[in-house]
Amino acid sequence: MFGRKRKSERLRDLTGEGALEEALEADLAVIYKHSPFCPTSARAIREVQSFTQRKPEVPVYMVDVVRSRALSQRLASDLGIQHQSPQAIVVRKGQPTAHGSHYDVTVDQLERWCSGAAD
């Protein structure tokens, strides 16, 4: 089944309030919303894992949108970004600065977003 491969050690599970606060308080972080049943998410998570290898200094938090549905919905509401999956959201000190979904979730795009470069 999709998404059953062992995830990267650098992906941090975002499953509770403490991890959410940690992600939102970071100077820079990526929040990645993943569905374990979606083939597009299976492709996107490989891109996110490649990003963690290229940029290990940037914390990446993963939300399983199936197991943590309420948290995923809260993120959409609190950040003002419509829920998608797969979806990557770059936050700086609690504010979203870039986001994309589906085929926009690539290692190169994540690097551009985190560097502050415009699309």
Image: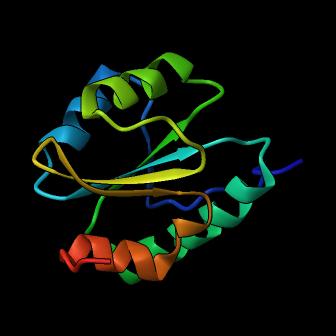
105 is higher (above) or lower (below) than 18: below
Camera-nearest residue between 25 and 88 = 88
Camera-nearest residue between 114 and 8 = 114
Q: Position of residue 39 (x, y in %)?
A: 80, 55
| x 53%, y 67%: residue | 104
Camera-nearest residue between 53 and 36 = 36
Quarter of the figure that contains the C terminus? bottom left
Q: Is residue 95 left or right of residue 69?
A: left
Colour scheme of the picture = rainbow
Q: Is residue 94 left or right of residue 99?
A: left
Q: Position of residue 51 (x, y in %)?
A: 45, 75
| x 19%, y 39%: residue | 24
Q: Is residue 91 left or right of residue 53?
A: left
Q: Position of residue 44 (x, y in %)?
A: 62, 63
| x 57%, y 72%: residue | 47
Q: Position of residue 118 (x, y in %)?
A: 24, 77
